[in-house]
Amino acid sequence: MKKITLNLILFMLLVSTAQSQSFEKGNFNIDLGIGIGVYATHQKNTQTVVAGGLTQTQKSDTTDGAASFIVPISFEYGISNKFGIGADLTFSNYFIAEEDKPNLKSVKGFDFGLKFNYHIISSKRNDLFVGFGFGISSLSWNAQPQPNQIIDGYSGVGSYWNIGISDRIFFMDNIGIIFNMSYRGYSYTGLEANLTSEGEDLVKLLDKFEQKIDWTFNGVNVGLGVAVKF
């Protein structure tokens, strides 16, 4: 009788533990948040102009810093009790320094990629996990309108990667909050210049006009948001 009672208690504890996990196989999670990104940047700029048989090339190599307000939207599906796969959407709006505002209107980015998570702790109300992701990113750099302006911005597509740690804390069975911190890297190769009408007229008079911009960002993202589980 004592053995049966002990086995019954152990079975009930196992069932209770299994039911108390905040992340399990088959779970579908949606995270919607806000955050801040802070980056070190490196820009290489090469401009080539050919006119009347003469070629002029200008190059610059600069390092700087950047910060952005970010809105991440994340989807994850549990393929086991420890591993999840999903997708990320991230909108970035970069802050403009006061000294740049007369010339720079906005810098915005949009990311879409895949992610893979490993869940370290999954108790009844807490879901702590690490993750790795990668994907594509678009960047749009827009200048303030100026008289006789030739170039009004730059745009292009690059890639990103991300590694970080996140913690979902559930107040109810299906709704909670999420905290995250990650290290993120961007690489944009060959951003294209967007010419104004004046710029297009000028280029027609040249034998060749080419501008190549390579831009990299590396830094830290932190944020919080709402976590929903189905």
Image (tube, rainbow, N blue to C red):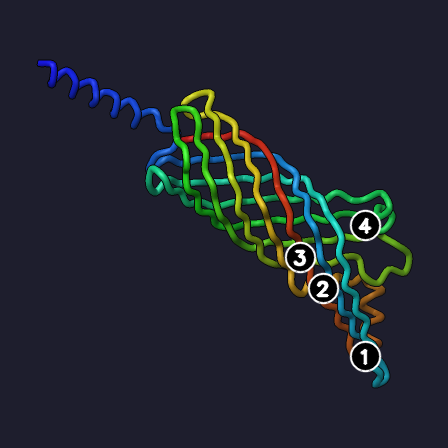
Q: CA distance from mark 3 to mark 1?
A: 28 Å
Dot 1, crowdedness within 10 Å: few (<14), some or many (≥20)?
Answer: some
Which one is in front in this view, the residue at disc 2 or the one at disc 1?
Answer: 2
Q: Are marks 4 and 3 in contact (CB under 8 Å)?
A: no
Is 199 left, or right, of 214 in this rendering?
right
Which one is in front in this view, the residue at disc 4 or the one at disc 3?
Answer: 3
Label 2 sits on residue: 213
As drawn, the residue found furthest toward the bottom would be: 53
Label number found at residue 109: none
**Up-down: is 224 above or below 60?**
above
- Percent coordinates x, y for residue 206 in the rendering: 82, 77
Which one is in front in this view, the residue at disc 2 or the one at disc 3?
Answer: 3
Q: CA distance from mark 4 to mark 1?
A: 28 Å
Label 1 sits on residue: 50
As drawn, the residue found furthest toward the top would be: 1
Of helix, strand and loop, which one carries label 3? strand
Which one is in front in this view, the residue at disc 4 or the one at disc 2?
Answer: 2
Q: Please, what is the three-letter code of the amino acid marked with disc 2?
A: Ile
In the picture, which quadrant includes the N terminus? top left
Q: Please, what is the three-letter code of the amino acid marked with disc 3?
A: Thr
Label number found at residue 216: 3
As drawn, the residue found furthest toward the left would be: 1
- Percent coordinates x, y for residue 58 in the rendering: 81, 71
Counting residues from the N terminus, which is met first, the one under dot 2 or under dot 1? 1
Q: Nearer the viewer, residue 169 or 1?
A: 1
Query: Which quadrant holds residue 139?
Result: bottom right
Is 133 left, or right, of 7 in this rendering?
right
Counting residues from the N terminus, which is met first, the one under dot 4 or under dot 3? 4
- Percent coordinates x, y for residue 140 in the rendering: 70, 53
Of helix, strand and loop, which one carries label 4? strand
Label 4 sits on residue: 104
Dot 2, crowdedness within 10 Å: few (<14), some or many (≥20)?
Answer: many
